[in-house]
Amino acid sequence: MAITMSQFESELANAVTRRRILWVDGVGGYLLADRDEVTLGQAVAGSSADIGIVGDIRRRAGVIRRSGADYLLQPLQATQLNGQAIDRAQLLRHSDLIQFGERVRLRFTQPHPLSATARLELVGLGKFQPHVDAVLLMADSCLIGPQANCHVHCPQWDPASAPLTLVRRSQDWFFNATQELLVHGLPQRGLIAAVPGLRLCGADFSLSIE
Amino acid sequence: MLNLLTRKKKPDNSPGAVPSSEPSAQVQAASLTAETQSAAGCYPVKVQAMKFKFGNGDQPLAGFTIKRGVGIGGFGEVYFAVNDAGKEVALKQIQRNLEVEVRGVRQCLNLKHPNLIGLYDIKFDSAEQGWIVMEYVAGQSLRDAIDAHPRGMPRAELERWFGQLAAGVAYLHDHGIVHRDLKPANIFDDSGIVKIGDYGLSKFISCSRRGGQTESVGTFHYMAPEIGKGEYGKEIDIYALGVILYELATGRVPFDGESSQEIIMKHLTAVPDLSLVEGPLREVIGRALTKNPAARYHDARAMLEPLGLAIDERYLFVSRAASIPPVVTHASSAATATQPAPDQIPDRATEPPRSNRWCRSRHAAHKPEGRTQEHFSPVASVYYQEPVARKIHEGWQGLSAWWSRLPWSPGQKTAALVVLIILLTINAGTLLPLLIVALMLYVPYYAVWWTLRTPTPSARQRAQRTARTETHYARQQSHAHAAADHHWRPEAKQPFAQGWGSEPPANHAATRRAAAVARPLSFKKWRMARRHQLAQVPRRQVWSEVTGSWIGAASVIAVFSALAGLFQIGMGQAVQPLLIGTVWAALVALSVAWIAIGFGKRWQREEGDWALRAFTQLTSGFVIGAFAYALSQFLMVPWDGLARQQLGEIPVHRWSGFFSADGQPLLPAYLAYFPLLMGMVQWWKQVDPLRRTRLSFLAVLWSVIAASLVHLLIPFPQPWGALIAAGASLAIQLSSPWINPAERLQA
């Protein structure tokens, strides 16, 4: 039985080690982090951090761990949560402000009430490496659309259109296209695998996966 | 002055126009008709803005890899790209590729100012398409910032944006360049530094940068009236600054309308409504928006002076805000008075401080008061002093909080309520008598409780004690409420307890002392936090805990089986078969305990999936079954002497595959019984260091019940099956490490 368990785990590990970036034209770049546990740390060569930040923080500054719909922040260096110093794991709430060290500040949000997916943005100084606008801690779904409660908020899209969804199906991510979209120029609908190199065009938008 | 263009009045222009060699074919042409016509051509109703020719990974220009599209304007598309060395740049296509356009950019190539987006280079690709290589700014545009403050920005924000904007414009003007297309969509925030874009190109720009319809109309919002006459002095930038300042202060533009024609008419004739703006801002905006360019400020610097701001000789924005008195309306001072100190409020409860606003607010100050009252209300539950009533009340509050936080739609909630009511009605026949019995029990109980608590000679002490527990309770209540309000902060001081009245002053001190103590965690949160720490425990340590627990389980089982054996002997029963049976049962229970501990420790890292764990345990039951069978063969357990009369089983035992003719269990019986037993009981919960109590008799009882349930199906000789389950449960719980949850109350 133990063998079966470790097989499960190794499969899981294989599925989640890739790093993907969603580039939405006219909106921004988003690092898709779909592990249940991500390490934040300084972006230096050979860093083991899943989310690299160009800033004055440790190589491993903290760990964010998802458990169901909840997120826990385990500090690994001097850390403040909403201005209070913390020294042990804390539950993260929508709109919490995390500060590592003196300068690097991150805003944690869970924009959509029905999705556990969360968003991390840098406030003020510092930037992510690679240079993206936000990191999405992907649970099971992610909304990209004109509505304010979308994880990727695209204010310029046609406000009447339904959001485009990214869904997890057996450890892989797919766009769920309710309308016909152009994939590398060819019309397609239904599930479209969000693999690197994908180029997707809708009626009034385009996006890529790196 | 950069004045490369000869302007002619020629209204033929549309965004996709074939590159024209005639530089006058621009939207910013002179006549009003030209403006409106070009508007019709330029801004299609259907927004096509955010589709780009190039996508991630494309290399239209050698040496640069596109990351994503940033924006589209009449001049072409703008991309975020990275060069081969890793430098991040913005690439802007020069759409029409005109010699004058390139010359205009070249003129600005070596301007250097922190508030201007830096231009690096002009390059041509293989198709002779011109590209401007420039600084990439990741932050939001002023458009986004204004949209985020629909009723005007706080004063500090306004000063930051406007001061730096004016500094950049002053620098441009002093270098002989008129921007001509100043608008929020062209102004960006780069980590606090304001950056002006699109200078140099601006006179060629026909469409807005964003291309969206609202925004495109917005282009007209910033156009000075004299543009219609073909005058392009730096006064048009001053006018645009006036419009932007108005928008910063109020969240809206001074001249708005349904059509571009209407907006332009207002620019030409209407007087801006300055009643929304106060103090020095009103004068500055009023003068900047004067129709006659000569009557406006001649310099961006002069606009800052009345606001207490300035630009120094290096063209850097400096603030002199301290020299002018703040403008505070009555409503806003009331708001600050009712609001608790900002450091005591969780972030989301904080409204932007109103006193920082120059803009008059219509809805000032009602919200904070409502919020404060909201926090007072739950204290009423303090009056339930009787423990049972209080528990019920608490439970009800928790339930309603849970219900209101439930992420269901109102329809789903109504449906659930209807189902609940139907269920209650159907079962009213059984529920009502139960309720009546409970009431009949409660009334005498309450009477007794009430007589016992009536004041005695030492009543004062007791009253004080009660008051203190009440205070404590009030504190917990507000905690619960604060948590329900989505503001859980671990070390936050408790701000509301002091507002709780109706107690003698001495208790206020107690309340304050109590309030200074960190708030205890709820069990669930404590468990989450601890679980997270458990996940960090290295494998080696877990393994040493496992071996420790195995030894512990062995000794517990040894003690219990020795006791059981002694009792049986004492009762004068046949010795040898009993001893053999006890040894067999002890060893099997030990194997159950060991396997359960092994899995449980492995799974303590997270709250896991029930089904997968139960299935894994069930599978391991085959190993135990095989072991139990082998052991019984080896020890030659005399089942016929051991098995008690079998009660209430399904006639499965007559199945010859499970039991031999004389009632001896065969291998299939073992292989069916133990997997079911392992699958029925959630053993890992008994191993979990975060269980509520070290030894839960309920858990032992459930293990026995599970064994009996399995027994109904497969009548394994009893009481041995139940004994094995009980023994394993006891051994597991006693030997597994346990973290006392009481620690969360100390914190």
Image: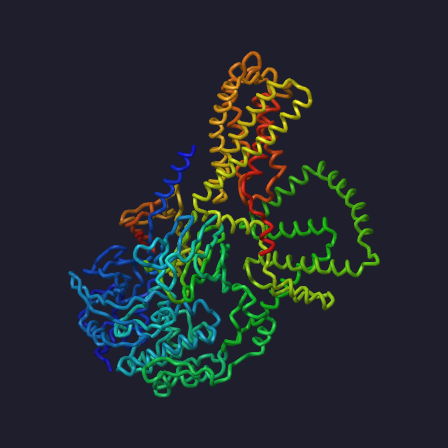
Q: Is residue B408 left or right of residue B426?
A: left
Q: How is the image coloured?
A: rainbow
Q: Residue at x 33, y 83 (%)?
A: B235
Tell me: residue B694, above or below residue B522.
above
Q: Is residue B175 left or right of residue B696?
A: left
The answer to which quarter of the image holds residue B484 is bottom right
- B34 lies left or right of B459: left
Residue B367 is situated, as x and y percent measured from the top left of the image, at 58, 67
Quadrant of the rendered image containing residue A6: top left
Determine the residue positioned at 47% across, 80% down: B274
Please indicate whether residue B401 sits to the left or right of residue A163 in the image: right
Measuring 43% from the left and 32% from the top, which residue is drawn there?
A: A1
Looking at the image, residue B565 lies above or below residue B512: above
Closest to the observer, B218 or B106: B106
Using the rendered image of the protein, determine whether residue A75 is visible from the camera's viewpoint.
Answer: yes
Residue B682 in view here: no
Q: Residue furthest bottom?
A: B295
- Between residue B638 and residue B395, name the one nearer to us: B638
Q: Image quadrant of residue B343?
A: bottom right
Where residue B286 sits: x, y (%)? 43, 83
The spot of residue A136 in percent (x, y) is 40, 54
Q: Say if B578 sits above or below A27 in the image.
A: above
In the rendered image, the vertical position of residue B484 relative to residue B17, given as above or below: above
Which residue is at the far top?
A: B661
Count of numbered badges drawn on the protein: 0
Where residue B687 sits: x, y (%)? 53, 39
Question: Considering depth in this image, is B497 or B398 the residue closer to the camera?
Answer: B497
